[in-house]
Image: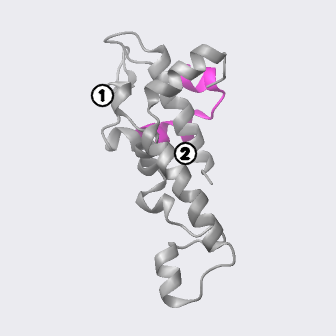
Amino acid sequence: MLSSTSKYGLRAIVYIAGNQKKGEKIGIKKISSDLELPMPFLAKILQLMVKQKILDSSKGPHGGFSLARDAREIHISEVVKAIDGEDVFHRCVLHNENCVSFENTRSRCILHDDYVKARYKIEKLFDEKTVHSLVNTAKNTDALF
């Protein structure tokens, strides 16, 4: 369901939240290297989150990225929507359109009724989970970012 771009973004923001020291920013090279993600692609993803005021960034020798707000206030749904757009939880599973617009022009897709229920549960989960909760889970389980 999630795009690779959103997955990279979630990994990056959890990494930043779990590794930033108070008042310091983490450089793009370090994030890219530690997460083994391509730097140019990661930079674009992080800038999407800067644009949505989820992350702060600065240039220069001490520049990099940091959370714009407390990790307890940043919900996973906000990160995914910043990267994949507002309709990410409303797209049809089989067609590359919003379910509502697709329904208005054609009959529902063959997975619509089942997928709507699953998608609702995922959206609810993402609305409830915060970056802080993911950082804590990662630290308590030795899970990878």
Residue 142 among those drawn in magenta: no
Q: Viewer-proximal residue, 57 or 20?
A: 20
Q: Is residue 111 left or right of residue 133?
A: right
The image position of residue 104, as x and y in percent, is 47, 87
Can residue 29 be seen from the camera position used here?
Answer: no
Residue position marked by numbered label 1 in the rendering: 69
Can residue 87 be seen from the camera position used here?
Answer: yes
Q: What main secondary structure does the magenta stretch of the protein show?
A: helix
Q: Viewer-proximal residue, 93 or 62?
A: 93
The image position of residue 100, as x and y in percent, is 47, 77
Residue position marked by numbered label 2 in the rendering: 6
In the orientation shown, which residue stands out farthest toward the right? Answer: 110
Which element is circle 1 on?
loop
Image point 37% across, 20% down: which residue?
Answer: 63
In the rendered view, tell whether residue 93 sits above or below residue 46.
below
Give the quadrant of the N terminus.
bottom right
Which element is circle 2 on?
helix
Image point 40% across, 23% down: which residue?
Answer: 64
Q: Residues within 10 Å of mark 2 (few under 14, many from 20)?
A: some
* Three-letter code for the amino acid on which mark 1 is drawn: Arg
Distance (Cα) linking label 2 and label 1: 19 Å
The image position of residue 90, as x and y in percent, is 49, 65
Residue range corresponding to the magenta coloring = 29-47
* Three-letter code for the amino acid on which mark 2 is drawn: Ser
Give the quadrant of the C terminus.
top right
Image point 53% across, 30% down: which residue?
Answer: 12
Residue 32 among those drawn in magenta: yes
The image position of residue 75, as x and y in percent, is 41, 38
Q: Quadrant of residue 58?
A: top left
